[in-house]
Structure formats: C-alpha cells, structure tokens
Amino acid sequence: MSTVTTSPTGPSSYSQVPDPLGRFGDYGGRYVPETLSAALDELEQAYAEAAADPAFQSELSDLLTRFVGRETPLLFANRLTEHVGGAQIYFKREDLNHTGAHKINNTLGQGLLALRMGKRRIIAETGAGQHGVATATACARFGLECVVYMGAEDVRRQAPNVRNMRLMGAEVRPVESGSRTLRDAINDAMRDWMGSVETSHYIIGSVVGPHPFPKIVRDFQSVIGKETVSQCQRDLGQMPEMVVACVGGGSNAAGMFYPFVDIAGVRLVGVEAGGRSAEPGSHAASLSHGQPGVLHGSLSYVLQNQDGQTSDVHSVSAGLDYPGVGPEHAYWHDAGRVEYTSVTDAEALDAFDLVARKEGILPALETSHALAWTIREAAKLPREAAIVVCLSGRGDKDAAEIARLRGFSEDMTHG
Amino acid sequence: MADVAVDAPLTKLSAALAARRRAGEVVVAPFLTAGDPDMDFTFEALATAERAGATLCELGLPYSDPIADGPVIQASYTRALGGGATLQGVFDLAARAAAQLTMPLVAMTSYSIIYRRGIERFVGEAAASGLTGLIVPDLPIEESASLASACRGAGLGLVRLVTPTTPPERAARIAAETTGFLYCVSVAGVTGERVSLPQQLKDRVQWLKEQTDVPILVGFGISRPEQVQEVGAVADGVIVGSALVRHLEAAGQTAEHRAAALAAIERHVGDLVAAAKPA
C-alpha cells in the first residue's frame, strides 16, 4: 500500500485546502475518465468566477433566506440536556430548511452554477433521497430538467422522498446493479454524465467525487458552520466545547466543521455508521475501519478488500450507507483536527426515540447517529460545557420504517 | 520511447504494432474480461483471438465500480468477481499467456486497483507477468506522474486516452506522453456498441496523426467489420470490447455454452481481421 503522509503547515492552517489540484493534504485529486476532464475544468472555472461575483453571492443568499428559510435556529435542547445530566446540548436546526435537510444549501448553489454554464439538464444521485429531493426542488425552481439515480433498495426504504421528487417533475431512475444503494447510484450518475457531459451538470450531493466537487459542496454547506459560529457568539457568549455531526460522505459535517477548524479549543467529532457490528460488511465507517484508496474520483479513506474492490457496507440509514468519505475528512482525520467515531444502528434508533420524546423532533436516522454519540458523551462533561449537534435533517422519511422496526401496528404508523 | 530497452515489455507491444503498419494492415485489438467466467476460459479465449488474427489483446481487470464502462462490461466484471477473480489470478493468467502465446497483452485497469496494491509493486508484478502495458481509464495526466515513472522504470507502456471532449492542446500533450499506442475514444460516453460513429472521428484521428508517430487505436462503440474499414482508413487500428464480451454472458453455464462462446469469439474476431486486410 502506498504511504500517505499529511503535514499541515501550522495549527491554524486547516482551512487552507484544497490546493489548486484539489488536494487536501495527500487526499482528493481527480481520478476520472478523460471524457470528464474538460467539464471539471469548466466547472472549476465557473465556480471561481461565481465565488468572486457579488451578484451570484447575493442571488444565492437571497434564495437561502426566502426560499430555504435561513438562518436556521440554534436551539437549546433543554429536556434532553436535563435527561442526560451533563453538558448543555444545542441543535443546529438544518431540519427546518425547506425540503427538511441541509442538502438544499448545496443544490441551490450548484443549480445557479449550472445556469451560469448554460447547462439545462441536471443529474444527481441520492441515498436517503434528501439530496434527490433538494435537487428536484432546485431544478423546479430554476426550470431545469432533472434525473435522479437512486439505488433500488433505497427507493424501497425512502419511498416518501421518491414520491416527492416525482411530484416536482424529476425522473427517478432506480439502480439495480451492485448493492443497489448510494454507491451504485453514484456509479450510474457518473456514467450518465460521461455521455451527456456537454449539456448536463452533475450535482453531486456530498463532499466526495473528483475536484472541484469536494470544495464546492463544502463551501456551499459552510453556511451551517458560519451561522453556528455567530450564533454561539451571540447566544452562548463563547465557542462550544464540542461540535458533533454525522458522517457518511460527510457534507453536513464538512459544512459545520469548516468554519470551526481554525478555532482552537473546539473539539470536532464526526460520527460514522457503525451498523450492526465492526465486522467487514456490517458497517459503513470508512474512517474508523477503512484505509486510503481511490473511489468515485478521489483519494480518501475507503472500505475495500485487498485487491481494491469496494466492500459491501451496511447502515440502517440510507444516507450513511456508503463505503467512502470526503477527502477533506481524511485530511482532518490524519491531521488529528477532527475525531471520528461511530455508533451502531441500535444506538441511532434509541437516540431517535429519545429525541422524539424529549424534544418533539423526529430526527433523520443519519442525524440520529450524531445524536446518539452526543447523548453518550454529554453525560461525561460538566454542566457548563456546551455541545452543538448538527441536526442535519428531519426524520419524516424514516418514520414508517422505524415504526415497522419498532413493531408498531399499521394503523399507528399511518394514523 | 527511444530510451526503451530492447527486451522491455513495451518493445514487444511496439514491434507488433509496427509490423501491422508495415504490412498496411489494420490492428484488431480485442478486449476480454479476465476471469469471466474463469481464468482458464479467458486463456482459451486469448488463444482463440490470437489464432483468429488479433494483433494484441486488452485484458480487463474486473473492478467493482467501473464508471467508464457500460452495462455489458460492468456485468462481465460482476460475473468475474462473483466467480472469484483476484488480481493474483489475473497476473498468473497473463504469465501463462505470455509463455504460450505470441501476441502482446495490455491490462485495462482502474487506478483504484493499482493504488491499493501500491504503484511500484503493481507495476513490478505486471511487468514480471509479461504484460506489455497498462491502460488506466480513470487516471488523467495530472494524476499520473508516479505511475508513469514506475512504468518507465519497468519498461511497461502506459497507454493514454483522448476523447471527443479533450481540447486540442490537451490532446497534443496526452499524445506526447503516451507510450505503446494512443487510445482514441470514439464517443463521449461509456463503453458499449454504437450503431454509428461520429462524423468528426476521422478528422480527429487525422489531426492526432499529425501530433504523434505513435500508433493510434480507436475504441468505444466498435463492433462490426464495416466499422473496422471505416476507422482503419485513418487510424492504425480498432479496439473491440463490449461486442466481444457479450459472447461471454452465458459461457459459465455449461461446457456447450463455453464452446459456443469460444466459437463466437473466433468468428467475430476473424470477421474483423478479414475486414482489416488491405483491399
């Protein structure tokens, strides 16, 4: 195996990535077929111009305010805090965004980029369906054609989101190959893009894929962390002890952590899907159990066998059911700036129940992973400490499946 | 390429291509998935292709997530992996073919597989097994310095690809860096048969010939004798993948299916080679 070394140039330099070749330390890069190279160059150029264009920034900002409903609140979870009996727990309410998750922050930004590039057809992949819905929403708003690839297994697990995408005019294409989950949806989205690259833009949903996607998605999602930093200053009068987010591909975590990485003293914790157990094939915790490898266009931590074949993974949450992770997380992991850990399916389900009953919020199963770890760790911290959890999405899409797993009767799940 | 040693693997590849060019014949380069349905079959298929007149063969290393491949090759990779194909098995197959056949073999592989093995180790094992070159479709020139250096050291070719979306100045740079041959992708898209090839293909190949002396092979979408003639009028040769791999679909079922698949490959390659001879 090739050696990977990461040497940040100083304690406050964590935000100075990627380099012009899309490298976060040694991770990232652009491992794609030549057919896509020109489109990625074009995207990089268009994004650089947009980022420097006040008109673009103001249009996006206006959409985030009026269409999405930002800024999202920072809520003190008082009954959960009381129940746990440790640090004060705060929720950054990304679940209150239009479409119910953080994904819309990225799809509106990339949708505007597609318009700038004159591309009228949008391709997306989706796991839990949140990114698919957010893409379908942006496309409806902008008048763009929308095709969403979704693993057939996820089409089953996340039926409400499939319906919502179709209601907004998107075409949902179930993917029957491989494990029929997120990874296969990304493969098929990329294959579509190979043949349609001159007229289509691929709105990738996480901080994964070839450069410049990990940077673009992180930047669009950083609104989460930026708002949180100023809300902490305003409401808490100080920075939190700890900031926690779930990590599949890692977009809500990257958006939350990025504005914090250069603030010394704030512990950042990414929580991966521990699945049923730490056995290969039973989890989706790439940083906890994987190693450096190339998947879907970038070098990062991946779960694969000794021949470089991608491993099957498992998580109860479709959005975390992915054998890779964004390259910036690999960089933060090796640099020691962010701690990565995992919780099991069962712990996430318990956290879902507790937060539903104590706070009147149904969190997404993905988010429930971050909540599970927070509930466990908050008890060990003093009462003066504050923990912020990125409440990345709402759990309506999961409610029927959880009710089924919990053995609730049909009339209760539908009543 | 001037500094390549006479006994280097790349020399065997270049010599085979040069011989066809001297004879005025179009190179026919079949692509076969290693290990679909098993390595013994692949060896027989390679021998069959050589007998039918193939100049060289591309050996596809099965990969779990081949984003540049269409449904036919993707399904073939899935069958091969499901049947237990391993990287060591592919190298063993290549070594057996190198010992018993005369045509050069070039491996088509995802960079994911190379990276996991380690670049130096992979290249060393590939050269030792008698492979003459590598085609790495998911490794653009910007990311290829380490692999290119290792291949140079081992005398292994590193075949680069240009596509319809590659801008001219970039195509010229790729043509300057390729070794063995230049892989000209006919269409923007994944592998798979196409009914017609783009009008601009001939112009693109003509332009590429002005940039490099390295043989130019055209691949993606080619399956029929008339396409060999059409492309062969400008390019050095053709690569035929999905259409041949389609013959493997049922090869794993019974001995009869196996024999039928080999016969189909022999006939198909034979037809393409017949079309490749000068009129």
Image: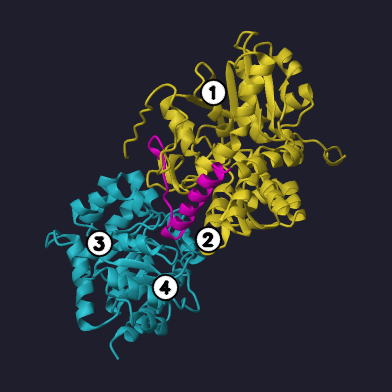
Chain colours: A yellow, B cyan
Q: Check if mark 1's residue and mark 3's residue have beta carbons within 8 Å.
A: no
Residue A258 picture location, percent across and down: 53, 30
Secondary structure at badge 2 equals: loop
| Subunit bearing disc 3 | B
Q: Do labels 1 and 3 share a chain?
A: no
Residue A412 picture location, percent across and down: 85, 37
- Disc 2 marks which amino acid? Val
Mark-to-mark CA distance, 1 and 3: 47 Å
Residue B101, compared with residue B195, is above or below; it is: above
The magenta segment is A24-53
Mark-to-mark CA distance, 2 and 3: 28 Å
Whether residue A275 is visible to the viewer of this picture, yes or no, is no
Q: Which residue lies furthest to the left in this view?
A: B6
Residue A357: which quarter of the image? top right
Q: Check if mark 4's residue and mark 3's residue have beta carbons within 8 Å.
A: no
| Subunit bearing disc 1 | A
* Residue, disc 3: B179
Mark toward the start of the polypeptide (4 vs 3): 3
Q: How crowded is mark 4: few (under 14 residues within 10 Å), some or many (20 or more)?
A: many
* Residue, disc 4: B244
Mark-to-mark CA distance, 1 and 2: 37 Å
* A48 with respect to B26 (left or right): right
The structure residue drawn at horizontal position 65% and vertical position 32%, both measured from the top left corner, is A367
Secondary structure at badge 3 equals: loop
